[in-house]
Image: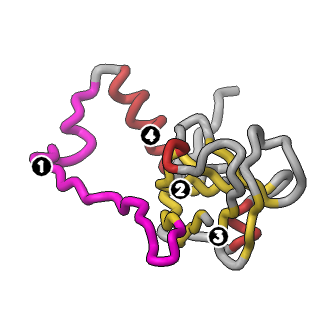
């Protein structure tokens, strides 16, 4: 008995379908019109507010519900200085070194080099009802 393949509208399934067809020698033109130009949109940059806080934004939410911001680890206060991260109506005191530290919401510099907000054992996105574009403040 052969495998049953169900096609879905899921991007992962579409990617697998196209990859399989390309590996069999089908030309890329079989999958749509060629792109002739790309417009790059500027990403929002962190800035200093009048109160001295650093204001950034959530750029991406990963599959675990972690909130990846546009604030680079290098932009954060030096080690040993007090830091408070404000996202939504929640405040996080200090930075963690790993996802396993502490309880509840935590903030850390992820492998990408950017500030991330995570919820130990859960989804920060769901807990905070967060979306890409939401503001994050560092005090």
Q: Earlier in the sequence, mark 4 or mark 1?
A: 4
Q: Residue furthest top?
A: 24
Instruction: Choose top left, top right, bottom left or bottom right for residue 105.
Output: bottom right
| Between 124 and 75, the one nearer to me in the picture | 75
* Residue at disc 3, secondary structure: strand
Q: Is residue 29 above or below residue 23?
A: below
Determine which of the numbered discs, if any, sits on residue 69 in the image: 2
Q: Earlier in the sequence, mark 3 or mark 2?
A: 2
- Label 3 and label 2: CA atoms lie apart by 11 Å
| Between 133 and 22, the one nearer to me in the picture | 133
Magenta highlight range: 26-53
**Does 89 sit left or right of 7 as displayed?**
right
Query: Which residue in the structure is indicated by mark 4?
Result: 15
Mark in front: 2 vs 4: 2
Q: Is residue 34 magenta?
A: yes
**Does 49 sit left or right of 81 as displayed?**
left
> Callout 2: few (<14), some (14-19), or many (20+) C-alpha neighbours within 10 Å?
many
Would you say residue 102 is visible in this rendering?
yes
Q: Split into 4 quadrants, where in the image is the C terminus? A: bottom right
Mark in front: 3 vs 4: 3
């Amino acid at each position: 008995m052969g495998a049953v393949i169900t096609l879905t509208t899921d991007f992962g399934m579409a990617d697998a379908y196209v990859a399989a067809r390309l590996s069999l020698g089908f030309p890329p033109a079989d999958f749509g019109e060629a792109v002739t130009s790309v417009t790059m949109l500027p990403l929002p940059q962190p800035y200093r507010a009048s109160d001295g806080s650093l204001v950034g934004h959530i750029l991406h939410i990963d599959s675990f519900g972690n909130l990846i911001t546009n604030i680079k680890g290098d932009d954060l206060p030096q080690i040993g200085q007090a830091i408070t991260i404000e996202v939504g109506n929640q405040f996080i005191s200090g930075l963690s070194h790993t996802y396993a530290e502490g309880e509840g919401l935590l903030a850390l510099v992820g492998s990408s080099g950017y500030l991330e907000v995570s919820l130990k054992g859960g989804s920060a996105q769901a807990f905070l009802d967060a979306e890409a574009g939401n503001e994050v403040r560092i005090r």
